[in-house]
Amino acid sequence: MTMMLLGLGGSWLAIFGKIAAASYYVLAISTALVAISWLVSYQRGSLTKLKWWLSGTTAITALAWVVAFNETRINDYLIMQM
């Protein structure tokens, strides 16, 4: 809706279909990168400085997995609210 208000028509919505098809791959790569970040920061001894940043990225990645696995339920709930 915001993009349409800014003058971008509805044709850009087709991009989301392609992104949604690759969502599990993107999440898997994101999870691997977060795990590697934890490992590298532990090996370099900078875990104490980066623990809050890494905890935040881990929480956001976990939330993304929860949303991805419950996408159907979320869509059904939002449709019921209409």
Image: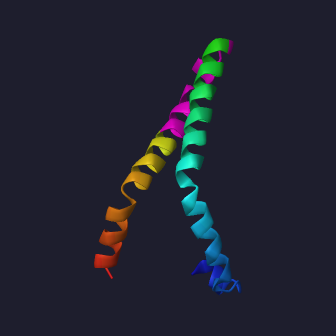
Tell me which corner region of the image, top left, top right, bottom left or bottom right, holds residue 4: bottom right
The answer to whether any part of residue 53 appears in the image is: no
Residue shown at the point (61%, 76%) measured from the top left: 13
The quarter of the rendered structure image containing the C terminus is bottom left
Q: How many marks?
A: 0
Tell me which corner region of the image, top left, top right, bottom left or bottom right, holds residue 77: bottom left
Classify 62 as above or below 22: above
- Give the percent coordinates (x, y) of residue 68: 44, 54
The answer to whether any part of residue 49 appears in the image is: yes
- Give the percent coordinates (x, y) of residue 54: 56, 32
**Nearer the observer, 14 or 6:** 14
**Nearer the observer, 36 or 41:** 36
Is residue 75 one of those drawn in magenta? no
Residue shown at the point (50%, 44%) measured from the top left: 60
Classify 41 as above or below 54: above
**Residue extent of the magenta highlight:** 44-58
- Give the percent coordinates (x, y) of residue 12: 67, 77
Which color mode does the image show? rainbow
**Nearer the observer, 38 or 25:** 25
The quarter of the rendered structure image containing the N terminus is bottom right
- Majority secondary structure of the magenta segment? helix
Classify 44 as above or below 52: above
Is residue 48 one of those drawn in magenta? yes
- Give the percent coordinates (x, y) of residue 57: 55, 39
Residue shown at the point (62%, 34%) measured from the top left: 33
